[in-house]
Amino acid sequence: MASKEATSQKEKKNKKVKPLWIIISFVVLIAIMLIPTGGSIPVMAKVSLAILAFAVIMWVTEAVSYPVSSTMIVSLMILLLGFSPVQNLAEKLGNPKANGAVLHGSDLFGTTNALKLAFSGFATPAVALVAAALFLAAAMQVTNLHKRLALLVLSIVGNKTNRIVIGAILVSIVLAFFVPSATARAGAVVPILLGMIAAFKASKESKLAGLLIITAVQAVSIWNVGIKTAAAQNIVAINFINQSFGHDISWGQWFLYAAPWSVLMSIALYFIMMKVMPPEHKEIEGGKELIRAELDKLGPITAREWRLIAISVLLLIFWSTEKVLHPIDSSSITLVAMAVMLTPKIGVMTWKEVENKIPWGTIIVFGIGISLGNVLLNTGGAQWLSDKTFGLMGLQHMPLIATIALITLFNILIHLGFASATSLSSALIPVFISLTATLHLGDQSIGFVLIQQFVISFGFLLPVSAPQNMLAYGTGTFTVKDFLKAGVPLTIVAYILIIIFSMTYWKWLGLI
């Protein structure tokens, strides 16, 4: 009862704070716009940085929901960039025209041109891939195939607690291949684990409950790194890499680079969790029977599920053999799969079934996040911010491994303020891309940026660091302190492995 009152008071406090953060966001925006720079930075670059500051404050404080803040951000881009002088950016921004005349340095960029730039993120293969992937995740929910997969894996591991912990990790790994949504994966496995805890008559506050739930969601975050299509933030990074370096990273290449890291992290996760949250019992009596009962409730595999299995397996084959056996990119083949899934008779769902299961706000946030990154890159704002932020560190005189170590630490600390890795990618990846130019990394640029994208997916430290963490936190099975007890050593191991892989495996593969 006391905890409920505390939660209620906290919610009231947060509601009071939200308008304040909106005001602060606008004050910071205006302050940056008014700072005299003496011509050291183009006006449009300064405007883009002011909008970035506004976006970061809105995202970090969650003053409004992410889709709402995204509409505010896109409006600011249209108005503020539209009324900015083009200066020396006319050629870089496609030599835009106003009323048929080429714009000169003193002319305004124009809201029409700003509108195109503000919505440029929606005209990318990345948005198509994320949208189609959300339909695949929805298909899993409509058919309950994701739940069946989770139950089948858990039915194999047995009743011993340590084996169930391994099972929770394995479920997250298996689902990462087929369910391109971290929240959906967590949403599939967490209720099953809660059912096992209840069947054992253990309380939600028990170490066993915290052990299983935290393990499951940490494994989800680990495999956000391992598989390209496992998380939206990966597609954000791929889009910026493709635009800036003219190089695409296939599903198979990503898997080759990142999956070994995720495998080692999964092993580390098991030992860390068993050490910091040892369960009260070594065996869950009736756990296997509960899983079997849940499978029986689902009944035999339906024709729709078989069709979805076929589509998912074929999709996985096409993803993994991109640029090896065929030239079809991940976005295109996923859109084809989406069309097949919606086709009457041969598909697995109707539009009516799926429209309420698609988080449309995610697509809005994703597209506008990419647009903001494009603005930062095209106006020179990202390059200026990179030079000023990292220029004083003397990174250009450091060995590459030392630079990776320092920037990775910076990345981990910045993540503490972000609840959305997609937003973090939108804000940081353009800056990291600009940093590669400052450091003259050449062929090592793509690898450097990709490694930092891996780090953006960490989210191990706090419940607020990722949506799947918050989903788990909402079960009441663990405290923030419990999550930190697991998250701190996990983050340390993850950091060390990033450095070791940079010195060995990724170097051997020619990534850096």
Image (spheres, helix red, strand yellow):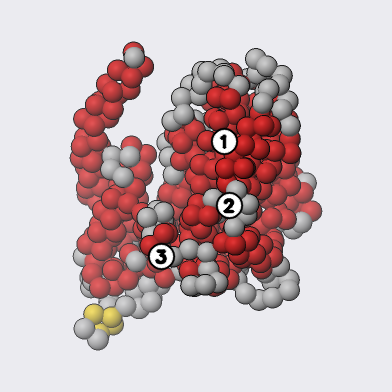
In the picture, the disc for residue 351 is 3
Of callouts 1 and 2, which one flags the residue occurring earlier in the amino acid sequence? 2
Assess disc 1: are there few (<14), some (14-19) or many (≥20) residues with their C-alpha within 10 Å of its C-alpha. many
Q: Is residue 451 left or right of residue 380?
A: right
Q: Residue at x 24, y 80 (%)?
A: 98
Expressed as whole percent of the image width and height from the top left, the position of residue 482 reads: 54, 21
Q: Amino acid at mark 3?
A: Trp
In the picture, the disc for residue 154 is none
Mark 1–mark 2 distance (CA, rounded to whole Å): 14 Å
Expressed as whole percent of the image width and height from the top left, the position of residue 63 reads: 28, 39
Mark 3–mark 2 distance (CA, rounded to whole Å): 18 Å
Marks 2 and 1: in contact by CB < 8 Å?
no
Quadrant in which the C terminus appears: bottom right
The image quadrant of residue 280 is: top right
Q: Is residue 295 above or below residue 325?
A: above
Q: Is residue 255 above or below residue 468?
A: below
Q: Which residue position is annotated with label 2?
A: 145
Of callouts 3 and 2, which one flags the residue occurring earlier in the amino acid sequence? 2
Residue 275 shows in this picture: no
- In front here: 119 or 227? 227
Assess disc 2: are there few (<14), some (14-19) or many (≥20) residues with their C-alpha within 10 Å of its C-alpha. many
Of callouts 3 and 1, which one flags the residue occurring earlier in the amino acid sequence? 1
- In front here: 476 or 128? 476
Assess disc 3: are there few (<14), some (14-19) or many (≥20) residues with their C-alpha within 10 Å of its C-alpha. few
Q: Amino acid at mark 2?
A: Leu
Quadrant in which the N terminus appears: top left
Q: Which residue position is annotated with label 1?
A: 192
Q: Amino acid at mark 1?
A: Ile
